[in-house]
Image (cartoon, rainbow, N blue to C red):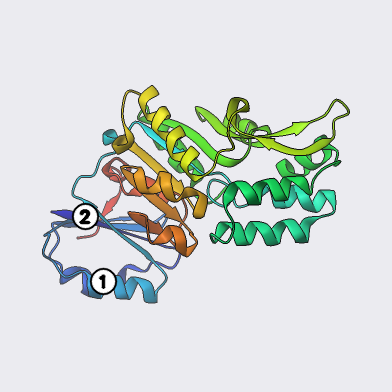
Amino acid sequence: MKDIVLQGIDLEVDAFMEAIEALAPEKVLFRRSDPSMRICGVTDDADLLPLKALARTHQIDCVTVPADYSIKSFKVWATDMDSTLTQNECIDDMAFAAGCGEEVSRVTHEAMHGGWGFTESLQKRVSLLKGADASVVLSHAIRRERLSDGAETLIKLCRRHGIATYIVSGGFVQIARDTAKELGMTGAVCNELLIDADGKLTGEVRGPAGGKILDADGKRRAVEVLAQLAGGDLSQVICSGDGANDVEMVSAAGLGVAYHPKPVLAEKAKVVIRYSGLDLIAHLFKECWVDAERIR
């Protein structure tokens, strides 16, 4: 048996009930505040194509999970930061404050679509920031930071069930560390900008603890270590990301989520969120539905 979760800002129950009835589910739950629906107890051989086609037409996310899917199967949520946990690309915001925004944004766009190797593109972008006042550009990026919709809902669910929560990002620890702390997350594993004695960016970047720059392979290895620290393995990790540098960790995770993704990641993820917020990840789990309205 399986459950199906529908979520999107324009979700209207009446538009979907005929397609839902054809699946003969055990019950249907509805959350008005999100809005979202959980179609429970659908047989494994049920034809989902009409429902999925209807969802695409209405720009509604449609995700299938095992019946009674529980967050208790997981020990860690590891998420990319830029354009996933937050709506911003922090290096682009820093670059605009430093006066090289257009050039850095172009390289960022190409890198996220797989047009550059991540390490090469990051070093190129950071080199353009050389000489900028670190406090000015970092403060500008932090002020512009905006959480993605539903992020706090997911974090609260994870904390309530003892799930460790980490930012694992090719971005910068000088920003991610404060973001994680403010949200009550467990920690952040990120690259680090180098700053000279005068408080200026040197145009160089290094990986966590002074090591190798955190690229796609590095992010996967970092997530594996975080899973071990939590007493589990990669099958007990939820990973979310949006671009090429997230492919390896999202592919390896027990639940890999592509969030408003570039095509290079969307084709690799178990779950793709195109229209909803990060709270859709929370709504995949039965624990989020205990107080939902039953409409069938």
Using the image, determine if residue 142 lies above or below residue 93.
Answer: above
Q: Position of residue 195 (x, y in %)?
A: 78, 31
Could you tell me which residue is drawn at 46 percent across and 33 percent down?
A: 222
Q: Which mark is residue 3?
A: 2
Q: Residues within 10 Å of mark 2 (few under 14, many from 20)?
A: many
Q: Is residue 144 visible?
A: no
What's under tag 1, amino acid-wise? Leu
Task: Tell me the element at label 1.
Answer: helix
Quarter of the rendering containing residue 174: top right
Front-most of residues 4 and 173:
173
Name which residue type carries label 2.
Asp
Residue closer to the observer: 285 or 87 = 87
Mark pair 2, 1: CA separation: 13 Å
Instruction: Please identify the quadrant where the C terminus is shown.
Output: bottom left
Is residue 81 at all visible to an observer of this figure? yes
Which residue is located at x 41 percent, y 37 percent?
Answer: 77
| Left or right side of 88 for 222 | left
Q: State if disc 1 and disc 2 touch (CB < 8 Å).
A: no
In the rendered view, tell whether residue 186 sits above or below residue 201: above
* Residue at the disc numbered 1: 51
Q: Whole-percent x and y of residue 164?
A: 42, 29
Placement of 95 over or under 235, stated as above or below? below
Q: Nearer the viewer, residue 116 or 199?
A: 116
Residue 89 - label: none
Q: Quadrant of residue 249?
A: top left
**Between disc 2 and disc 1, whose residue precedes?**
2
Rendered residue at 38%/61% (across/down): 267
Q: How many marks?
A: 2
